Image: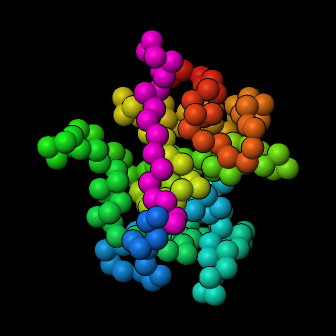
């Protein structure tokens, strides 16, 4: 058991800032691009919650679309895959790789949470994509990979949600609050 209160060995990341990094975003698909997911595109246990139309509006994914296994959501923006890979890598001052997320999935939660929302914590898993600043990421220690579904279930539990609701003072669920919410240990 870790003495620092972080038994999952979780680290956090905000991958792309939608304003400051907007110069990196592409309006159309390219062969070397990945979708840029925004929080509103996912929901609890659902990586295909909403999609963008050709007109640039977002809409919920229909039941018929969800019933189609190969269906994928369409993002508003695309981002270069190499840029995503660089964000999923940490280097020391000499440029040596000290950490790299090498899984094909990302776990995160909605930054936006209002008191009028049914749930405070909306967490999900998405593929290896770019994520905007409203979908904050968490990376559990890879040694717990066999139990990562349990971590997601805990993030989506009513108990976790209730505690988060008591701690939120505004409309955002940032890292400093997320770190205070108890999780079941692995």
Percent of width and height locating residue 107: 51, 46
Determine if the magenta segment contains residue 8: yes
* Mark count: 0
- Is 148 placed left or right of 93 in the picture? right
Instruction: Find out whether residue 113 is within the magenta segment.
Output: no
Measuring 51% from the left and 66% from the top, which residue is drawn there? 19
Q: Main secondary structure of the magenta part?
A: loop
Could you tell me which residue is drawn at 68 percent across and 52 percent down? 112
Magenta segment: 1-19
Please indicate whether residue 97 sits to the left or right of residue 121 in the image: left
Q: Going by the image, does 167 lie left or right of 80?
A: right
User: Which residue corresponds to the image point at 34% horizontal and 50% vertical from the top-left?
Assistant: 88
> Which residue appears farthest toward the bottom when viewing the image?
55
Q: Quadrant of residue 31?
A: bottom left
What is the x, y in percent for residue 3?
Answer: 45, 12
Report whether residue 35 is seen: no
In this rendering, the answer to whether 114 lies above or below 51 is above
Q: Position of residue 155 (x, y in %)?
A: 63, 36
Q: Foreground residue, 129 or 47? A: 129
Which image quarter: residue 38? bottom right
Quadrant housing the N terminus:
top left
């Amino acid at each position: 058991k870790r003495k620092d209160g972080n038994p999952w060995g979780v680290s956090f990341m905000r991958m792309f800032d939608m304003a400051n990094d907007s110069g990196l975003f592409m309006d159309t698909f390219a062969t070397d691009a990945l979708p840029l997911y925004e929080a509103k595109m996912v929901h609890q246990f659902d990586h295909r919650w909403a999609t963008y139309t050709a007109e640039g509006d977002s809409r919920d994914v229909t039941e018929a679309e969800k019933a189609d296994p190969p269906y994928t959501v369409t993002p508003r923006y695309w981002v270069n895959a190499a840029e995503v890979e660089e964000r999923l890598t940490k280097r020391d001052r000499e440029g040596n790789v000290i950490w790299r997320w090498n899984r094909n999935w990302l776990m995160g939660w909605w930054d936006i949470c209002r008191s009028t929302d049914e749930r405070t914590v909306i967490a999900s898993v998405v593929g290896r994509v770019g994520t905007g600043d409203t979908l904050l990421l968490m990376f559990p220690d890879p040694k717990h990979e066999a139990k990562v579904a349990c971590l997601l279930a805990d993030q989506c539990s009513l108990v976790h949600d209730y505690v988060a609701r008591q701690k939120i003072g505004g409309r955002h669920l940032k890292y400093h609050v997320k770190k205070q919410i108890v999780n079941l240990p692995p």
